[in-house]
Image: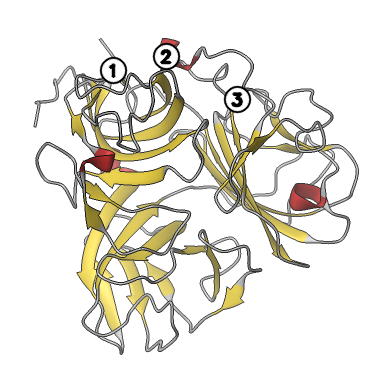
Amino acid sequence: MAYTTINKSTDYFNTKLYTGNGGNQTITGVGFQPDWVWFKSRDAGNSHALVDSVRGTTKVSYSDTTAAEQTISAQTFNADGFALVQDGGANSINSNGSTKVAWSWKAGTTSSISGGTITPSGVSISAASGFGIYKYTGTGSNGTIAHGLGTAPSLVIVKKIVGGTDNWTIYYNPQGGTSPQTQLNGQENRAMFFNTNGFSTSATYWNGGSGAATSTVFNLGTTGVVNESGHQYIAYAFADVIGYQRFCGWYANADSNGPFLYTGFKPAYFLMFNINNSGRWMIADSTRNTFNVIDKKLSPHNANAESTTGDIACDFLSNGIKIRGGSTSDINYANGNMMYGLAIAEAPLVGSNNVPSNAR
């Protein structure tokens, strides 16, 4: 059984749906004060807007563009959600009448952390939920940042926020996760991107090819995309936590009877990508899809409105995810393609309180 110290996943992650009003409004029901909120319009082609407490809630980055961070109106994070103000920009997170989704994460301590060669200027870290936010200034030399998560991150997302426009750069570590499905060899030192097709095996991304993450630090190379001297970056790191968060890997089989991914919990959120056919990034959640099959697709790499499609077809079960997409779907495209995904729990299979999760 998958015992966990997190019996209530919504203490650390939650999905909230709301409708923009073009003015001021407070969104409650998140269940905690967020440290990172990822906003997306469901009914319009507005950019994905990422706001965090480390940079401050007037700073936003967009996952579907390479632009440096932008300044927006003074949104605030509150004890049970967030307050939105009038914002008339093209990528407004409160545009009047528009249906929105907000994925919220709670991190934790903001005390400075030492142990790496680069000391972040701001952090928010939760070892309990395996999630951390790190703002740092690049050095141009191979370096390390202490992450404070206690176990090696399986996923690190990095963006230059001040000093120029560069790709979002993503490290994924199939050897660092606890899932046997992640043992897909030869992937550790690759870099993936939201905004550019393909992947890179260049040693300049993750500290000369020494491997991007250990139980104490994640590594940075010399490329300006992640570590240009004097330029500022934000990084989001995720580590596996039994019964709450898991980085999965699987081979597509191009069949509607697709692979089963054991997570040890009933999922609430699933961020996935295909490493062989780039541009196949997707986000699924149990709030927009309240029953199986999951079919509501949003993609971090583009601003498209939500679509209802078999591209993302899967079932969220009490102990994992069953892939249902066929041979032309993004989630199961082409037999043998390598797929990866970060799953976060709605409820553990069995918590430390010995209460089992029910299927959907």
Dot placed on the residue nearer the N-terminal end, 3 or 2: 3
Identify the residue under disc 2.
181
- Nearest the viewer among 354 and 60 is 60
Identify the residue under disc 1.
259
108 is higher (above) or lower (below) than 259: below
- Looking at the rendered image, the disc whose residue lies closer to the viewer, 3 or 1, is 1
Residue 100 placement (x, y as % from top left): 27, 67
Q: Quadrant of the C terminus?
A: top left
- Nearest the viewer among 309 and 128 is 309
* Mark 2 crowdedness (10 Å alpha carbons): few <14, some 14-19, many ≥20: some
239 is higher (above) or lower (below) than 167: above
- Nearest the viewer among 7 and 16 is 16
Tell me the kind of residue under disc 2. Answer: Gln
Label 3: which secondary element:
loop
- Nearest the viewer among 170 and 195 is 195
- Looking at the rendered image, the disc whose residue lies closer to the viewer, 3 or 2, is 2
Give the quarter of the image for residue 234: bottom right
Q: Residue at x 73, y 57 (%)?
A: 121
Is residue 122 in view?
Answer: no
Q: Which mark is residue 102?
A: none
Tell me the kind of residue under disc 1. Answer: Pro
Identify the residue under disc 3.
152
42 is higher (above) or lower (below) than 278: below
Check contact, mark 1 vs mark 2: CB within 8 A. Answer: yes
Q: Quadrant of the N terminus?
A: top left
Give the quarter of the image for residue 189: top right
Q: Which residue is drawn at 44% across and 27% down?
A: 339
